[in-house]
């Protein structure tokens, strides 16, 4: 008897019967533009083998002007169709089903030729779109329908029409972006005309045998967005025009409300899918921040949706469904919603991968085959680098002993897990623990081996991590000793007014930790909605609460400081930095760049800026000034003439994050 009876039950969608309710949602991988279609095929085939009920590809451009960026992939030529055929064949050979997403970006297209209902530039693009005339609109409809026909030629089981997230079709629906006065703008029935016509034409192009998913914006999260009545009206109309199933779109890309970041509660928006389903009937797909089979089962069994869409979790683990079906959800590598190796890569033109699973999109290049001969491998340090090496090496058949000086595994991850909004890191720690047991790693906690203890191993891996950097601030007599971030996260008391020295990722995390009190909004959707001003689209147009954001009052007064003369937080994650900055600003954190630290005094922290010298009246000073490598063991091994590998922070501490640590660990394990 499975714990996920609904999740694992079949469902028929139009012409297609799926073996389970799990859709792998659309994600751009970057492989689409490399020309290496074998690699893209391997990526999707692995997810099909892993049990995904239906795969939806990354968005494909219907024409040049609708492409997300110049040169983005689409089905334009016979060669394109042949390339896509490799993907669909690989998925079908693996027993899967795959639909192609058609994505017309409208004013979000990052190029000077972009088009839209009206010539209104998006706040996240430098390009003002050209307003389409009647013939131009017809050309776009035709391009989308043609893309659907070509998708069928290429072997896709159907298409998803992207109608949400503020893209082209969504832009016609709302007055924020549609100021037209012809039959495509103005009153509601005119604004909904384009998506409905597109769906009808795509249906005709597909024929009865092709699945048609329409991704509908359930909550725009921008001013002048849709009302709930409009959402329902459009849902009924696109279904009548030929959509087999409605997928949930949440928030425009330009919205100032996070929708998929780690601090967003799990399944935060699924109630909207449930309300849609109750009003217009199924099948409906719920999406956003669904990352475990248990959460998915709860939604499905509770009638909130007929299917769930998980995108990033399929980067973290290709075998999500297969492991759930085997009753081993504990072995599913969790997506922690960090965006660090997926969306942050996508938006900086790099190939997508996954912090937790560096093999994602590298399936053909980073392989972990069984080792030719089993070796005795010692790994010292059970932070992310050591853990990743240990489980990957043991998975290949090596006999791995993992030494950890502390009484628990995790290293820096255990600190991250204490930060409000980073609760997902706990799941990552649990997964590492389950994988250590599964791969039979011999874990020795509270053990710091000497070189002599390591002499008998065939390979020694030093993953001893980092120590917080002490910047050597001047501390006047009688002043409190500055604390390290690690001490504070581990529970050292701090006063009501705190100066944080260093505004990197950890400084921001620390400021978040210090300004919170009570339950974490990431685990309490009502608190979270209040914090970000998320309302009910039934009463608040676009789902933005009339009262605006109402965060809890801060627990402390915090100053976040850095020496570099730039806005603190500029170098945070590409897709998440704004969330951290906005969250701290809402808690009244004062962020200062261009600071020179003079001294910690009994009255506070004396600093100098271009405005002169000033005293920050802090009761406590916390240091978040980066890290230095912990290399004593490596030095002693070198002195003893014992060969060893150094990875993670022990190797290079600067700009170390879990992504680099895990990647380095897995790549080393592949070579052992
Ligand atoms: P970091 O990002 O390198 O930031 C260190 C901060 O300390 C900087 O603001 C730096 O700014 C300051 N600093 C460096 N040397 C100093 C000195 N001698 N005296 C005073 N200030 C000094 O390091 P981190 O914050 O410790 O983070 C470590 C790694 O973890 C980073 O790679 C980070 O990206 C990653 N991380 C990521 C996240 C995430 O959410 N993605 C969260 C936490 C950590 P100035 O030199 O300008 O003062
Ligand atoms: Fe999830 Fe982070 Fe991996 Fe992206 S990089 S798939 S957000 S764990």
Image: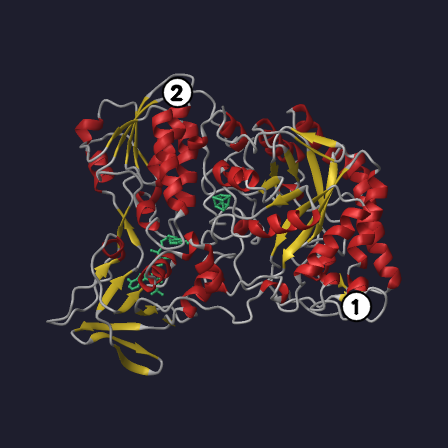
Element on which disc 2 rests: loop
Badge 1 crowding class, 10 Å Cα cut-off, few under 14, some 14 to 19, many 20 or more, is some
Whether residue 114 is visible here, answered yes or no, is no
Query: In the image, is residue 559 above or below residue 110?
Result: below
Residue 94 is situated, as x and y percent measured from the top left of the image, at 64, 25
Type of colouring: secondary structure
Image marks 1 and 2: residues in contact by CB distance under 8 Å: no
Residue 103 is situated, as x and y percent measured from the top left of the image, at 71, 50
Element on which disc 1 rests: loop
Work out whether residue 618 or residue 362 is closer to the camera in this orientation and state it.
Answer: 618
Q: Which residue is mark 1?
A: 187
Mark 2, ligand 2, within 8 Å: the answer is: no
Q: Quadrant of the C terminus?
A: top left
Badge 2 crowding class, 10 Å Cα cut-off, few under 14, some 14 to 19, many 20 or more, is some
74 lies left or right of 300: right
Say which label, 1 or 2, has the lower sequence index: 1
Whether residue 342 is visible here, answered yes or no, is yes
Of marks 1 and 2, the one in the foreground: 1
């Amino acid at each position: 008897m499975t714990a996920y009876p609904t999740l694992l039950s079949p469902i028929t969608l139009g012409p297609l019967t799926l073996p389970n309710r799990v859709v792998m949602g659309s994600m751009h991988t970057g492989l689409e533009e490399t020309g290496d279609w074998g690699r893209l095929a391997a990526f999707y085939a692995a997810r099909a083998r892993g049990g995904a009920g239906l795969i939806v590809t990354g968005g494909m451009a219907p024409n040049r002007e609708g492409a997300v960026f110049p040169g983005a992939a689409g089905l334009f030529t016979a060669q394109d169709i042949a390339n896509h055929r490799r993907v669909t064949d690989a998925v079908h050979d693996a027993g899967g089903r795959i639909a192609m997403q058609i994505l017309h970006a409208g004013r979000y297209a990052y190029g000077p030729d972009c088009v839209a209902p009206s010539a209104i530039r998006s706040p996240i693009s430098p390009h003002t779109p050209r307003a389409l005339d009647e013939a131009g609109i017809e050309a776009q409809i035709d391009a989308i329908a043609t893309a659907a026909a070509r998708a069928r030629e290429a072997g896709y089981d159907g298409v998803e029409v992207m109608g949400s997230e503020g893209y082209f079709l969504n832009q016609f629906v709302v007055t924020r972006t549609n100021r037209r006065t012809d039959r495509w703008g103005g009153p509601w029935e005119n604004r909904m005309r384009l998506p409905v016509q597109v769906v009808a034409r795509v249906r005709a192009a597909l024929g009865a045998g092709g699945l048609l998913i329409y991704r509908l914006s359930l909550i725009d999260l921008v001013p002048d967005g849709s009302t709930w009545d409009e959402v329902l009206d459009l849902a009924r109309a696109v279904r009548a025009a030929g959509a087999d199933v409605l997928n949930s779109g949440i928030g425009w890309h330009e919205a100032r409300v996070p929708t998929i970041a780690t601090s967003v509660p799990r399944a935060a928006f699924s109630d909207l899918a449930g309300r849609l389903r109750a009003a217009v009937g199924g099948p409906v797909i719920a999406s956003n921040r669904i990352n475990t089979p248990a959460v998915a089962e709860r939604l499905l069994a509770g009638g909130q949706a007929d299917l769930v869409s998980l995108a990033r979790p399929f980067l973290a683990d290709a075998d999500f469904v297969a492991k759930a079906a085997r009753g081993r959800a504990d072995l599913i590598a969790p997506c922690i919603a960090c965006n660090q190796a997926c969306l942050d890569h996508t938006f900086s033109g790099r190939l997508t991968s996954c912090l937790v699973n560096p093999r994602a999109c590298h399936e053909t290049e980073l392989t972990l085959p069984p080792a030719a001969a089993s070796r005795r491998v010692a790994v010292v340090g059970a932070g992310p680098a050591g853990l990743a090496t240990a489980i990957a090496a043991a998975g290949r058949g090596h006999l791995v002993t993992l030494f950890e000086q502390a009484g628990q595994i995790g290293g820096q991850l255990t600190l991250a897990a204490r930060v409000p909004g980073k609760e997902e890191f706990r799941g990552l720690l649990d997964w590492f623990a389950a994988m250590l047991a599964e791969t039979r790693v011999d874990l020795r906690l509270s053990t710091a081996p000497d070189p002599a203890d390591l002499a008998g191993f065939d390979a020694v891996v030093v993953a001893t991590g980092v120590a917080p950097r002490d910047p050597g601030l001047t501390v006047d007599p009688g002043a409190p000793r500055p604390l390290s971030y690690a001490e504070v996260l581990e529970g050292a008391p701090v006063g009501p007014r705190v100066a944080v020295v260093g505004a990197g990722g950890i400084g921001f995390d620390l400021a978040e930790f210090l300004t919170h009190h009570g339950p974490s909004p990431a685990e309490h959707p009502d608190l979270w909605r209040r914090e970000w001003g998320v309302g009910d689209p039934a009463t608040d147009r676009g789902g933005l609460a009339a009262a605006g954001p109402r965060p809890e009052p801060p627990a402390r007064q915090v100053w976040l400081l850095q020496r570099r003369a730039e806005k603190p937080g500029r170098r945070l994650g590409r897709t998440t930095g704004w969330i951290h900055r906005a969250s701290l600003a809402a808690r009244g954190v004062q962020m200062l760049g261009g600071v020179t630290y003079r001294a910690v005094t009994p009255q506070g922290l004396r600093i100098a800026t271009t405005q002169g010298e000033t005293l920050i009246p802090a009761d406590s000073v916390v240091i978040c000034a980066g890290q230095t490598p912990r290399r004593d063991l490596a030095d002693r091994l070198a002195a003893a003439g014992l060969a060893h590998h150094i990875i993670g922070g022990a190797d290079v501490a600067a700009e170390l994050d879990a992504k680099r640590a895990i990647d380095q660990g897995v790549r080393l394990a592949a070579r052992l």
